[in-house]
Amino acid sequence: MSVENILIVGGGISGITAAVEAAEVGYSTVLVEKNPYLGGRVAQLNKYFPKLCPPYCGLEMNFRRIKPNPKITVYTMTEVEEISGDEGNYTVRLRVSPRYVNEKCTACNACTEVCPVETSNDFNFGMDRTKAVYLPHEMAYPMRYVVDRDVCTDSSCDKCVEACKYDAIDLNMKPETVEINVGSVVYATGWKPYDAANVDNLGFGSVKNVITNMMMERLASPNGPTKGKILRPSDDKEAKKVVFVQCAGSRDENHLNYCSAICCMASLKQATYIREQYPDSSVTVAYIDLRTPGKYEDFLNRVQADDNIKLMKGKVAKIEEDPGTGDIIVTSEDVEGGEKIYEKADMVVLATGMVSSVTESAALNFEENGFILAGKSSGVHSTGVAKRPSDVTSSIQDATGAALKSIQSLVRS
């Protein structure tokens, strides 16, 4: 007899979509996310392309679908330790890390105000700091604070406990092991940015005003480290002259030998951020090939129509810093012009590729680049960027298909 539950591993846009689509046709789903909030990388974006609308709109609609639905069980700060069994009857062991904040939390912020410890803010890629007790971001789901006990300088510190009048903070919480039975599994484990520090000639980590494309998303976001002002990190100068470097480590046998499919569109989108904020700004996009298929061709044409955005087919050879001004000197080869170009910029944005964030699993088969090829049994499926690099729209469509496949697994068994 099959078990009528579906496990979704990963609470980004793909995992959320698979969970709500399956639940809304009557199947119980368990949504597991290792972070203390749902939303994944989409929660860190400023805008989607090509409509240039904020992602919080789509996420909020999905959260409203999750919250009242008794068919969806959400575990945050949770990872899958083991999956055993076969299609229709899997036993899954989950490890739930302590949040140290319970369901009584009202997100009043009193705990953060008294916390004496600051740490790097991972949500903003280290571009600002947060307290040891914090709300992951303004639209976090669940809307509940979390305590990072690893950075508490004094394990006996209880200022946050004293400040909370709702008894929502429990520093004695322990890790838990939860065992569940499910009939099918969907891996929606998403992606992480390629480490740009691996590409020596592009200066990330050594040249202060070189950032990555995901860091640019946070800079441009109203809830980002600069409240939406695009300022260069070294001195908060307005970044009015910006160079985007495409394929930063991608399509390179020494780094990522594949194309991540969305980087060109992401850089074109971010070029519009700068142009909208600073009317006197100028942008250069240095690319190998521009990949804007199908419906995205219109977006490319809109960007190309801006005389202050230069699209240059060329390879960036070196990025250096002018120590006197903090400006950046970019050396590149203009393939079409047939000459070497030296260009000064306030800031450089590296379009780093997508890397699979799934860890090794006995339940999965992987292709050569670490993306999920298939489950080792017919009841295990994958979706979104866990399967292949893709944009938000494609991931949502694929996740709807994965929900159907997971339901078919239950029906077959």
Image: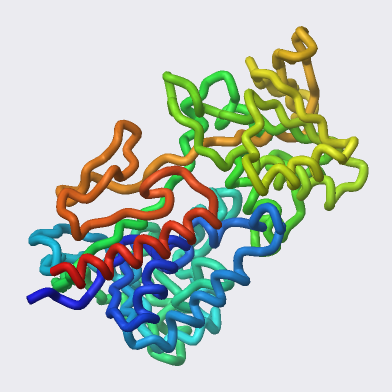
Q: Residue at x 30, y 45 (%)?
A: 372
Which of the image's four quarters has the C terminus? bottom left
- Side of 185 where 238 appears, left or right: right
Is 101 left or right of 49, judged from the image as shown? left
Instruction: Relative to 400, say whether 386 is above or below.
Output: above
- State the count of labels: 0
Colour scheme shown: rainbow
Q: Is residue 35 visible?
A: no
Q: Position of residue 280 (x, y in %)?
A: 92, 42
Q: Position of residue 301 (x, y in %)?
A: 79, 41
- Which of these two is toward me, 334 or 325? 334
Point 22% across, 72% down: residue? 174
**Quadrant of the image occupied by residue 20:** bottom left
Residue 49 position in % (x across, y down): 66, 53
Indicate whether 81 appears above or below 140: above
Residue lying furthest bottom: 166
Above or below, comparing residue 36 to residue 322 in the picture: below
Front position in the image: 300 or 316 = 300
The residue positioned 51% from the left and 24% from the top of the image is: 199
Q: Classify residue 237 by image quadrant.
A: top right
Specify the quadrant of the image occupied by residue 383.
bottom left
120 vs 77, nearest the viewer: 77
Q: Position of residue 58 (x, y in %)?
A: 58, 70
